[in-house]
Amino acid sequence: MRILLTGSTGQVGWELQRTLMTLGEVIPVGREVSSLGLRIDLSQPDTIRHVIRQVMPHLIINAAAYTAVDKAETEPELAMAVNGTAPGVIAEEAKLVGAGVIHYSTDYVFNGNQATPYTEQDEPNPQNVYGKTKLAGEKAIQAVGVPYFILRTSWVYGLRGKNFLLTMLRLAREREEIRVVDDQVGAPTWSRMIAESTAQILSQGTKDLINFLSSNSGIYHLTASGQTSWYGFAKVIFEYDSKRSEHKLEKLVAIPSHEYPTPAKRPAYSSLDTQKISSTFGLAFPSWQRNLELAVG
């Protein structure tokens, strides 16, 4: 099986390169020219079409995205090109070559007004440009009629790239006091867990991939179990950090969102219900605390 992987240098894409190796030939592509001479820029549809027609993959996994949530407010066209338009182009080309699609989306497609975890049946209503463009990407894939899995996740972190975990670890070594928002709730999810779960799902359909994808096509929520606030996440990061002896941090302060204004509005509550993916594919997700312990311990 030939697997074309976009966003191969990102948090999830990097982990996917390792976890997918047992399933087939992984062909990673990104904005830089690869060792195979391939390059994809999701803001340029022609590069997408060219690479897919050249590789002729059996499966396309789109782990690339415009993820700068605040910057998207001032770059809505670029964010829409990458997050909204490109997934539709990928789906069209996948259909053309007979491939399936796996695409990652976000908890930010919801408005955050609920008090219970969002299911796949709940109506999306994004409150910022990033969420709106990611929802557009979901709809673009669904409109094509290609076999697909859309995997919504949340609060993704890892040991590379830019994310909340790495920011907190850096600040703990630089500052004596850190102030963190305590009224936004979600599920911190390790990029490695996302990649390993994706591989576990795909391993169930290796004998007839397209039929497997067609039979189970849809949107699934994939996050660690449990929930916390950004403040709660930060608190446990510092507790679990194996290098906490290097911390300058003396005081962690919980603050409301209005004391930390951002260009993009965040949902106050964006926990995702994972019962559908668990029951469909027999997966059990560890707690966010357990994943964090493994990541930083």
Image: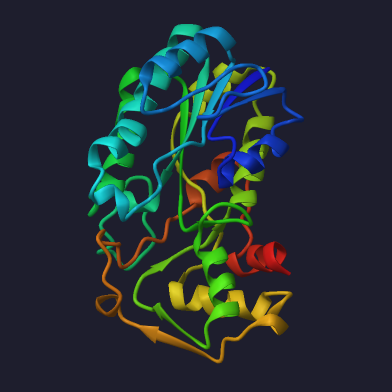
Residue shown at 52% from the left, 67% from the top: 167
The reply to whether residue 60 is in sight is yes
Q: Quadrant of the image for the C terminus?
A: bottom right
Question: Is 93 in front, or is 222?
Answer: 93
The reply to whether residue 56 is in sight is no
Residue 173 picture location, percent across and down: 60, 78
Q: Quadrant of the image for the N terminus?
A: top right
Residue shown at 69% from the left, 18% from the top: 207
Describe residue 64's horizontal placement relative to residue 239 as left or right: left
The single residue placed furthest to the right in the displayed view is 22
Describe residue 162's horizontal placement relative to residue 106 as left or right: right
Question: Is 96 in front, or is 169?
Answer: 169
Residue shown at 29% from the left, 40% from the top: 133
Residue 222 picture location, percent across and down: 51, 49
Residue 84 picture location, percent across and down: 31, 33
> Where is residue 253, by image quadrant?
bottom left
Residue shown at 67% from the left, 30% from the top: 204
Describe residue 67's horizontal placement relative to residue 223 as left or right: left
